[in-house]
Every structure is written in C-alpha cells, then in structure tokens.
Image: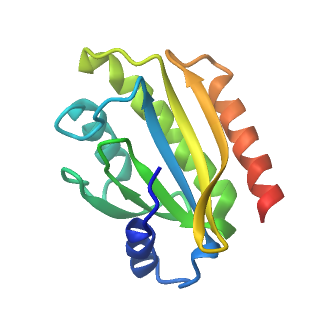
Amino acid sequence: MRTTTSGLDCAIRLIQKSSNYEDYVIFKILPDPETCFCSGCFPNVWNQLNEFIFPDGPIEHEGNALVRKDGCTFYIEQHESGPEIISLASDLLNIVASVAALVVIISAALPKERKTLKRLVVSRRKYKKGKIVESTKIEIALPLSPDAITELKTKMTKSNKRQS
C-alpha cells in the first residue's frame, strides 16, 4: 500500500476544491493474483478505461487524468498495481458509482487480454491523523456475478457514511 501522498497532492492541485488531505477519499482497484496492471501489460483494459473517461484523458503509461463524468470530478492515476481513483469525500455517491463502472469496464475487457485474474480487490482509503489508512476492502470474484456491483456500491456507500 502506498505510504506517500504524491498522488493525493496531484489530485488536490487538479481538483482545486480543498487542500486538506482528510477531505478526500482514495479508491484502489487491484488485480488478484498480483500482477503488473499497467497499460503495457493490459492494453485492452486501459483502452476501455480511456474510452470511459473521454473527453478527459487519455491516461498514458503510468500517467494520470482529471475526469469530469456524470456530475463527479475525480483524479485517476495508472499504477503497475492497478488504477487509483481520488475524489472529494463529499462526492461519495457519485464516486462510488464511477468506481463501480470502472470495475465493470475492467471485467469486460479482461477476456481480451488472454490473462487470467481470479478477482479484483477494491479498497477504500482515507487520510487520517497524518497517514493513509484502509477502511474497506472488497474482493470481487471474476467473472462478475449480477449482484457483485450492487454489493460493491452498497458496501462502499455504507463505509463512506460511517466515516463522513
């Protein structure tokens, strides 16, 4: 898990709403088993993600973008470990919907990669008392079941309400 705030600092500069780390929520989508998840190793996934964020982006190799989509502004950064999404915590319902959409896009693009993942892990983190802490972690089996996205939205929204 990342212990530095470089992605959060970049998101704060681009979102321009608050400079307080505790006002932001950080989502991370991780492949399981762990593997490099960059655009070089998973080009179809990142092509689909770039189509989703259009006209913002595209996200180049290990790059980032500020995205305005469906009433939500969020920062997305490509990492070898998986995409990281940062948004204002006050925009929780919209960001959870966007994270769920990203999970669906990734899941749909994976068969074209000829690589096997057992699941995606979505973690929700927040900056508290000087460090980033994980508050919720959800494992989503692949291929997606009809109820997986509903469960993701429900758990992340409940988690968000408790911590707001």
Image point (63%, 39%), residue name:
137
From the top left corner, tell me how far across and down residue 142 is, in percent: 50, 17
Image point (74%, 40%), residue name:
155
From the top left corner, tell me how far across and down residue 21 is, in percent: 57, 76
From the top left corner, tell me how far across and down residue 99 is, in percent: 54, 46
| 90, above or below 83, in the image | below
Q: Does the image show residue 59?
A: yes
Q: Does the image show residue 56?
A: no
Relative placement, left or right, of 24 versus 142 is: right
From the top left corner, tell me how far across and down residue 54 is, in percent: 32, 54
Question: What is the quadrant of the C terminus in the image?
Answer: bottom right
> From this viewpoint, which residue is outermost toward the right?
162
Q: Nearer the viewer, residue 73 or 43?
A: 43
| 34, above or below 17, in the image | above
| 15, above or below 100, in the image | below
Question: In terms of image quadrants, where is residue 59?
Answer: bottom left
Relative placement, left or right, of 88 versus 40 is: right
Relative placement, left or right, of 89 versus 110 is: right
Image point (49%, 47%), residue name:
28
